[in-house]
């Protein structure tokens, strides 16, 4: 008896030590970015700002958010579980260290949640199989590559809490199904609604369990048919067989739908509607430009490896191949298929289907993969432990240990190399200038990505941010309207057109204001309809590579424009070996030296019309004799050395169109211009006279309505003068 008790205590101690070790390593793998000056990336700034606003408002959320999508702003975010959790962490940290500040807490918060994620994932894995299955489930999820990238210290978006509460919610629901007692139903409902309060799309869990019910019945029919070697469609027997699972699930699904509807927290119909709108693409034209929401062909080798790489190659292989093998083995052994195995199949299938619509959903797939892989290995360990062959035991445990260490090693390497999401110093310097010099009621406009950073760091209003705000929510200008307008501002060659577009975001008309108040009766503050005091516009270097989307939305056609940036390739020499020019892009552009002049040549055939360059900080705009096409800008100041990059651009819209026509027919000289290696039917070049070219590359020197007030190597900040329209 004592020996058995000692053995049991020893096992528990080992499990606890392993769990604590996993928690520590999970935190450590995220710690490489702790020394970042501020939190990371774009979206985390939104939740940081929400939490900071609540903290400064005596822990009460305001009803209206003036900073996002101004004018007029939007209702303050309703799912505030994560901001309040960060505030709780901050209060605890203040007890331990009075000098702690909220920014430090926001950096710690996601890493802490990942560490805590070990517990619910372990509990779910243990419920599925055993303690070893629980440990492996925890290991596979906290070290999933897709999870590491969105849960580094400072990445205080909702991804970490989504994973943690996914496991806790699934665990609580299955525990309620297993126990079938009212207090477990209550516990499960409380957990689920707390998840909803953190992330509204937590309803996807209830959607999965709802779809699991017909999936379970179907599997039971197939299982019975295989056993009886005939098509056994006995619905009554199948239902009676599945009733211990279906009835508790039905009660729970009904309960949360009724309570959710009463409390205004949503229901299944709402999540079905949201899923339909997303899958149909309605009201979400902005998603075209979101890389993580582009379709993925998971049935190709590259597509599959892309997804498997994000969930983890080892757990993905164990889940996709190991789970069917386990079920097939049970069928051969005439062992009843556990409803858990059917649930895992449904869970993986549904999340795998979501990935077709974008790799953003790979995190949800990683949860299903981790649970399935943990289940497979948990069953394998149980099977081996019950056997007597020591060699097989040693081999299996050795393989499991090797795979575990391999996963941890890869995760540690990835975590320590996770750099590049920090907000760049040039951005922080510019934002500091805005905090110091901009009026508190100013509005800041740029492409929509950095809006969260601008609002979160400066406390200023933004024209748009990285969030969605679709028709029916943002009135009168939803995200579809704003992204088209901002694209047009950047690609148009008419400065006054750009100013007219921006002016409408300074203040709503009285009619528009009434429309907003009618939509959101009683919560719209008067500031929402008051004019912004001034507008600033940001042109930054990251927009060079996003320009195809500016042209896509701004011109609203399938022809995307891009800057042809060419790097230095070699020196051009004459027959005597003397340097007579510079080659860029393997001779796509050649700069020939003719005395004190520079003659740019396109593809060794065309003399370029215009040469733009800076010398001693002054812009030189030279038109080349006998030039026939386009403009070349030399990047950098050429006083001390020639630049490492040049940009080729058509002069204007008409010339840009000519490039597309030239690839389909002969050019004016009657010869094939060989542009096919540069462009295709859906891509042409960004123009020299576009607003972005003038703002960023030419530092606003040719503009009258945009006054350059701050610049550095990566950013040009302008103050918009609306008086130029008068």
Image: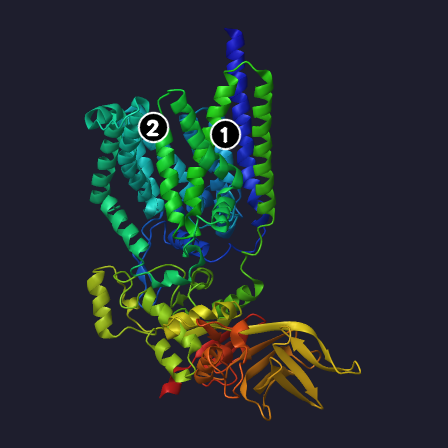
Residue toward you, 143 or 679: 679
Q: Residue 143 in the image: x percent, y percent?
A: 52, 40
Residue 649 in sight from this viewpoint: yes
Q: Dot 1 lies on which element?
A: helix
692 up-or-down from 143: above or below: below
What's the coloring here? rainbow
Query: To which quarter of the image does residue 180 belong?
Result: top left
557 up-or-down from 467: above or below: below
Name the residue at 51% across, 41% down: 312
Q: Residue 257 in the image: x percent, y percent?
A: 23, 40
Name the residue at 28% across, 39% down: 211
Q: Residue 70 in the image: x percent, y percent?
A: 34, 67
Query: To which quarter of the image does residue 178 belong?
Result: top left
Which residue lies under the disc numbered 2?
A: 339
Residue toward you, 422 or 413: 413
Q: Quadrant of the C terminus?
A: bottom left
> Nearer the N terminus, badge 1 or badge 2?
1
Neighbours of disc 2 within 10 Å: few (<14), some (14-19), many (20+):
some
Residue 486 in sight from this viewpoint: no
243 up-or-down from 521: above or below: above
Query: To which quarter of the image does residue 232 belong?
Result: top left
Name the residue at 60% across, 19% down: 391
Residue 135 marker: 1
Using residue 248 as the reference point, say whether residue 328 is left or right of it: right
Q: Nearer the viewer, mark 1 or mark 2?
A: 2
Q: Dot 2 lies on which element?
A: helix
């Amino acid at each position: 008896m004592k020996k058995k008790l000692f053995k049991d205590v020893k096992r528990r101690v080992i499990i606890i030590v392993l769990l604590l070790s996993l928690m520590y390593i999970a935190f450590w793998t995220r710690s490489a970015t702790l020394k970042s000056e501020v939190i990371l990336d774009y979206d985390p700034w939104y939740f940081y700002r929400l939490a900071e606003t609540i903290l400064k408002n005596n822990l009460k959320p305001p009803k209206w958010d003036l900073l996002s999508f101004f004018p007029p702003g939007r209702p303050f975010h309703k799912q505030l579980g994560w901001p309040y959790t960060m505030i709780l962490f901050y209060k605890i940290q203040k007890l331990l260290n009075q000098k702690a500040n909220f920014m430090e807490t926001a950096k710690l918060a996601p890493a802490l949640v990942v560490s805590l994620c070990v517990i619910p994932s372990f509990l779910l894995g243990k419920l599925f199989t055993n303690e070893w299955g629980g440990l492996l489930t925890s290991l596979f999820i906290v070290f999933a590559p897709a999870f590491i990238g969105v849960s580094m210290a400072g990445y205080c978006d909702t991804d970490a809490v989504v994973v943690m509460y996914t496991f806790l919610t699934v665990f609580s629901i299955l525990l309620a199904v297993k126990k079938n007692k009212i207090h477990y139903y209550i516990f499960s409902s409380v957990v689920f609604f707390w998840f909803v309060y953190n992330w509204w799309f937590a309803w996807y869990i209830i959607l999965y369990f709802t779809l699991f019910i017909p999936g379970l019945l179907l599997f039971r029919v197939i299982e019975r048919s295989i056993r009886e070697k005939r098509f056994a469609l006995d619905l009554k027997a199948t239902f009676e067989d599945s009733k211990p699972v279906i009835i508790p699930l039905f009660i729970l699904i009904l309960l949360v739908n009724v309570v959710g509807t009463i409390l205004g927290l949503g229901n299944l119909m709402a999540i079905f509607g949201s899923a339909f709108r997303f899958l149909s693409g309605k009201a979400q034209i902005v998603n075209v430009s979101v890389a993580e929401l582009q379709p993925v062909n998971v049935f190709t080798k590259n597509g599959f490896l892309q997804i498997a790489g994000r969930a983890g190659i080892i757990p993905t292989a164990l889940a996709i191949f190991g789970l069917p093998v386990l079920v097939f083995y049970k069928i051969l052994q005439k062992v009843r298929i556990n409803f858990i195995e059917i649930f895992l199949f449904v869970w993986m299938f549904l999340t795998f289907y979501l990935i077709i619509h974008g790799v953003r959903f790979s995190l949800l797939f990683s949860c299903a993969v981790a649970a399935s892989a943990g289940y497979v290995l948990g069953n394998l360990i149980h099977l081996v432990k019950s056997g007597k062959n020591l060699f097989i035991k040693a081999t299996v445990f050795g393989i499991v240990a090797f795979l575990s260490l391999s996963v941890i090693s890869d995760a540690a390497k990835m975590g320590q190399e996770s750099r590049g999401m920090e907000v760049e110093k040039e951005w922080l310097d510019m934002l500091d200038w805005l905090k110091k010099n901009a009026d508190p009621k100013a509005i800041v406009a740029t492409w929509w990505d950095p809006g969260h950073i601008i609002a979160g760091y400066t406390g200023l209003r933004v024209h748009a941010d990285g969030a969605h705000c679709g028709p029916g929510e943002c009135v009168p200008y939803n995200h579809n309207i704003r992204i088209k307008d901002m694209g047009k501002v950047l690609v148009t060659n008419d400065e006054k057109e750009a100013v007219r577009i921006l002016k409408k975001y300074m203040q709503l008309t009285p009619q528009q204001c009434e429309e907003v108040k009618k939509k959101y009766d009683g919560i719209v503050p008067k500031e929402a309809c008051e004019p912004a005091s001034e507008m600033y516009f940001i042109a930054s270097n990251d927009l060079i590579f996003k320009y195809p989307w500016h042209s896509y939305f701004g011109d609203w056609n399938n022809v995307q424009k891009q800057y042809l940036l060419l790097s230095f390739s070699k020196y051009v020499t004459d027959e005597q070996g003397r340097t007579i020019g510079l080659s860029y892009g393997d001779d796509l552009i050649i700069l020939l030296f003719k005395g004190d002049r520079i003659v740019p040549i396109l593809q060794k055939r065309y003399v370029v019309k215009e040469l733009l360059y800076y010398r001693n900080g002054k812009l030189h705009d030279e038109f080349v004799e006998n030039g026939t096409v386009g403009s070349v800008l030399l990047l950098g100041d050429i006083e001390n050395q020639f630049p490492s990059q040049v940009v080729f651009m058509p002069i204007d819209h008409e010339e840009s169109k000519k490039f597309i026509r030239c690839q389909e027919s002969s050019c004016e000289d009657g010869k094939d211009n060989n542009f096919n290696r540069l462009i295709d039917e859906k891509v042409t070049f960004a123009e020299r006279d576009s607003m972005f070219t003038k703002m960023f590359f030419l530092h606003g020197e040719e503009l009258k309505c945009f006054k350059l007030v701050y610049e550095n190597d990566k950013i040009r900040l302008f103050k918009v003068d609306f008086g130029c329209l008068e």
